[in-house]
Amino acid sequence: RTVCRQFASSIFEKADAQDRAGNSNKNTARTFYAAAVFYEMLGQFDAELSGEGEEAEEQHKRKYSKWKATEILKAMKEGREPTPGGYEEPVV
């Protein structure tokens, strides 16, 4: 579980850093989706192994990753530049 959590976090952080730098592309969307899959996998483990805070954070990152992957692909399909950052975050 710990190894899977660390791997999911590293994939998520890689995609998030690339997105926030304004360098989102199809591979960024794939990386976000992969992170979502790993976070979903973590939910399959026994809930007693971790604290509530970790599970809530993993669930948030899973939902965010799926949303962001969809948002990037949607922007590319529409021919526009994907917006860096999260939902309703100010663009710097």
Image: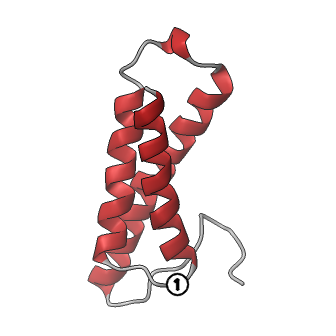
Q: How many marks?
A: 1
Residue at figure coordinates x 54%, y 9% from the top left: 48
Q: Position of residue 37 (x, y in %)?
A: 32, 43
For this orientation, the residue located farthest to the front is 3
Q: In the depicted view, which residue is nearer to us: 35 or 71?
A: 35
Residue receiving disc 1: 22
Whole-percent x, y for residue 73 in the image = 31, 72
Does 78 sit above or below residue 31?
A: below
Q: Answer with left or right where residue 34 lies relative to residue 48.
A: left
- Residue 38 seen in the figure: yes
Quarter-of-image position of residue 28: bottom left
Q: Is residue 15 above or below residue 38?
A: below
What amino acid does circle 1 point to?
Gly
* Mark 1: secondary structure: loop
Image coords of residue 10 (percent x, y): 48, 53
Locate the N terminus by quadrant: top left
The residue drawn where x is 50% and y is 14% is 47
- Is residue 87 rendered to the left or right of residue 5? right
- Whether residue 62 is visible, yes or no, is no
Indicate whether 50 appears above or below 54.
above
Determine whether, in the image, residue 40 is placed left or right of residue 2.
left
